[in-house]
């Protein structure tokens, strides 16, 4: 996982948009984000699944699902889905994402008066928990 301030330059939301201004894990933690790396390479599924089960138990999660955010996984809905994911929104509950394969971005907005976007670049094995009530968007 790598985090940095979003550069706010217009263009494809799937581009890195790295401003070069790093955000530290401590800064993310102050915003209420939780990150854990769960290695997958060289491990059996039952082993890394046990790590996910542990986090789910610690945080009292009752449900989980899997989504394949790719053209193969979403078919004709791919373009419209990724545009909808990039719309700023928030949730009343935590939002949890674990990257099984590939990579993606989560942008979280800092509180006023700054209200800057922080981009969290995630790769395989990254688990990220966003707190309730934080504005975010994803790709």
Image: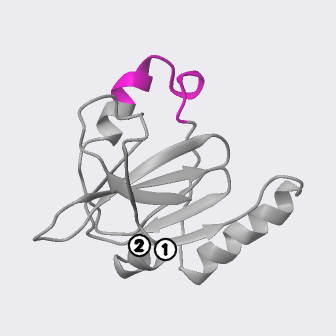
| Mark 2 residue element | helix
Residue for badge 2: 28
Q: Position of residue 12 (x, y in %)?
A: 34, 29
Q: Which of the two residues, 56 or 134, is positioned nearer the viewer here?
A: 134
Q: Is residue 106 above or below residue 71?
A: below
Q: CA distance from mark 2 to mark 1?
A: 5 Å
Magenta portion: prevailing SS class: helix
Q: Position of residue 83 (x, y in %)?
A: 31, 32
Q: Is residue 8 left or right of residue 75?
A: left
Quarter placement of the C terminus: top left
**Disc 1 crowd, CA 10 A, few/some/many (<14, 14-19, 20+):** some
User: Could you tell me how many numbered marks the image carries?
Assistant: 2
**Disc 2 crowd, CA 10 A, few/some/many (<14, 14-19, 20+):** some
Residue at image point 38% right, 33% down: 82
Q: Which of the two residues, 86 or 73, is positioned nearer the viewer here?
A: 86
Q: Is residue 11 above or below residue 100?
A: above
Q: Which residues are magenta?
A: 69-81
Q: Is residue 10 left or right of residue 119?
A: left
Q: Is residue 105 left or right of residue 17?
A: right
Residue for badge 1: 25
């Amino acid at each position: 996982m790598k985090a940095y301030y979003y550069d706010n330059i217009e263009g494809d939301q799937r581009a890195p948009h790295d401003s070069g201004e790093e955000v530290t894990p401590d800064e993310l933690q102050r915003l209420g984000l939780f990150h854990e790396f769960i290695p997958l390479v060289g491990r059996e599924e039952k082993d890394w699944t046990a790590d996910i089960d542990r986090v789910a138990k610690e945080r009292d999660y009752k449900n989980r699902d899997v989504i394949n955010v790719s053209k193969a996984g979403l078919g004709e809905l791919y373009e419209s889905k990724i545009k909808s994911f990039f719309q700023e929104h928030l949730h009343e509950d935590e939002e949890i994402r674990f990257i099984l394969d590939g990579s993606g971005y989560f942008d979280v907005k800092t509180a006023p008066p700054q209200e800057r976007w922080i981009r969290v670049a995630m790769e395989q094995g990254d688990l990220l928990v966003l707190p309730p009530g934080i504005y975010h968007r994803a790709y």
